[in-house]
Structure formats: C-alpha cells, structure tokens
Image: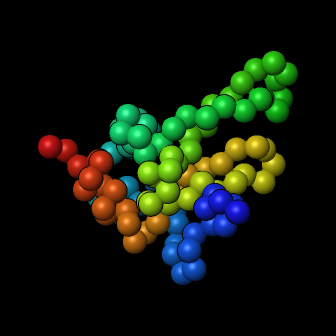
Amino acid sequence: MSQDERGPPSGERTHPITILLKRHDVGLSAAKANKILLARGILEEKTRPSETEPGKVRTYKALTDDGLRYGINRPQQMIDETTPRYYEDTFQELVSKYLAEG
C-alpha cells in the first residue's frame, strides 16, 4: 500500500495549501504557490479522462515522491484523481525551502 492510499502517519494533520498559506502568512495565492512547487519538483501534473466529456482529458496536481515529505495525495471519492494535502508540522519547512523569496 502506498503513502497515497494510507493517508497521513498517525496524528499528523493535513490541510489544503490555501489554509496553510494563510495560517503561515506566506503572502502567495494557492495558484502561485502551486506554480512554484511544480517548477521545483514538489508537485506534478497528472491526467485523467473527463467524466463528463468523452475524449477529453483533465489535469490535476499531485505531490511527487519528494513532495510526499510535506503531505499526502488524498484520493477523491467520485473520480480517479487525488488532491494534495499538506502536513501542518512540515509546512514551514516547505515554505522556507521552496516558497520563501530570495
């Protein structure tokens, strides 16, 4: 069973990036932070077939193997897709290493 399927280690809380960016007063939107994390190899774009438009492909973001240090890929209930969720305890490290300016 992969980290994606197991969920966070016992006791580790996860949150969407939007909440943690605000809580840590990072000053970036989720879209901008995701763009940076994509460029730095923490996130990747994956694809899946559209559920409503046959022949179309949808993209979504997932944490890479390196990114799994900072969170999990939470499976969605109704579609074959995951959503990145970040650990509270390691988010400041993520910000310092990848999102801080300078």
Q: Position of residue 9 (x, y in %)?
A: 56, 74
Q: Can the viewer see residue 22?
A: no
Q: Nearer the viewer, residue 5 or 28?
A: 5
Say how the picture is coloured: rainbow
| 2 to the left or right of 19 | right
Q: Quadrant of the C terminus?
A: top left
Q: Position of residue 98 (x, y in %)?
A: 30, 48
In the image as oriented, which residue stretches furthest toward the front? 1
Q: Position of residue 44 (x, y in %)?
A: 51, 38
* Residue beneath the point at 83% across and 29% down: 52
| 101 to the left or right of 99 | left
Above-or-below relation of 3 to 66:
below
Q: Quadrant of residue 32?
A: top left
Q: Position of residue 24 (x, y in %)?
A: 32, 62
Above-or-below relation of 89 to 56:
below
Q: Can the viewer see residue 38?
A: yes
| 38 to the left or right of 60 | left
Q: Quadrant of residue 21?
A: bottom left
Q: Quadrant of residue 35?
A: top left
In the image as oriented, which residue stretches furthest toward the bottom? 11
Q: Quadrant of the N terminus?
A: bottom right
In the image as oriented, which residue stretches furthest toward the top? 55
| 96 to the left or right of 79 | left
* Residue beneath the point at 70% across and 44% down: 81
* Residue beneath the point at 41% across and 40% down: 41
